[in-house]
Amino acid sequence: MIPAAHRATPSGTLRARGLGLPFDGEPGALNAITDVAGVGVGYATLIEGEGPLVVGRGPVRTGVTAILPRPPAQLHVPAFAGCCSLNGNGELTGTLWLDECGQLTWPITLTNTHACGLARDATLKWAVGRLPGCLDDAFGLPVAGETYDGWLNDINGFHVHERHVFAALDAAAGGPLDEGSVGGGTGMICYGFKGGSGTASRRIAHEGRHYTVGAFVQANFGRRPELVIAGRPVGRQLEMSAPTRSGDGSVIAVVATDAPLLPHQLKRLARRVGLGIGRSGTYGHHSSGDIFLAFSTANAAALAAAGGLADLVFMPDRQLDPWFEAVVQATHEAVVNSLIANADMTGRDGHFVAALPHAPLLALLREGAIG
């Protein structure tokens, strides 16, 4: 029996498991990054207008996603983190310092390319307004990421404003998540189909304890013929017109875990995201920005220590294989969810992007689609 949260999103859209697609590994209760206790996700989705592009007036197909590594009252406590760039044609702010100190502080925001700086700055304003004293005699370097939605969206109209970032941050919470054309993923395209936001998780049993790994992707990458689902090259078999946008998009992925991992270990987890994305067929194009971040919610007391020595626990490196496997599995399923839990979209200048069609996909898988 497939749990309801695995079958469909809160808005009732089918997810990959609801369509009967097979995946390896044991998902968490929600099969989402929010299976990691304390992690919250919020969206602000902007869909307005239709017809020819008028810069500054639309059509608008964009938004903001906010990921909180800890509940708001605990955001002042850093989280150990690591990041990895598979291909650097993109932006993830704050990662120079994150690499230097191995810690993530403040929420992560994801949006379109031309709103990335605004999202970063608005996160600081949100923190000052919502968390009084959090930046007294201190500075903040929030992480904000982007992928390009200009084929569907009036990206040069700068329709994302501070209030949208605030709304996504205020909405961030645990629980089941909508996927597809929501938040920062609203205007994205993946493998020539409607892409966007996707998530999944895995449970790990280790020495008498259970841990969770959750992945979230903003999927905007790949070419139609590359798409592989359930090990089958279905993209080349689906006879549908593909968008004629230039470039090959990008993907931002965020991995969360409650396991006690150190920064260098989390960087190693972030590297495995590329293997998970590769399972869906892409080989990483020159023009694609493929940037990944992983963080751990463990060791909060040690990271909150004000001075002196702090004690922490960590997983020995030689025990990390189950976490590597979980990252690959969860990332792969998150990408597929971003495609399955989606709908057709028409954007600027009548540009149309079809959602991955469920019935033809299932027919190809039943027939054993081959190249």
Image: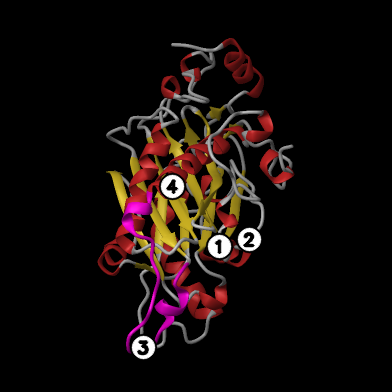
Which residue sits at x=61%, y=28%?
21
The amino acid sitting under disc 4 is: Pro
Q: Which residue is mark 1?
A: 39
Residue 153 seen from this side = no
* N-term mark: 2 or 1: 1
Label 1, secondary structure: give it. Answer: loop
* N-term mark: 4 or 1: 1
In space, the residues marked 4 and 2 are separated at their CA atoms by: 24 Å
The amino acid sitting under disc 1 is: Val
The C terminus - image quarter = top left
Q: Is residue 301 magenta?
A: yes
Color encoding of the figure:
secondary structure
Q: Are marks 4 and 2 in contact (CB under 8 Å)?
A: no
In space, the residues marked 2 and 1 are separated at their CA atoms by: 6 Å
Query: Which residue extends farthest front?
Result: 207
The amino acid sitting under disc 2 is: Gly
Disc number for residue 137: 3
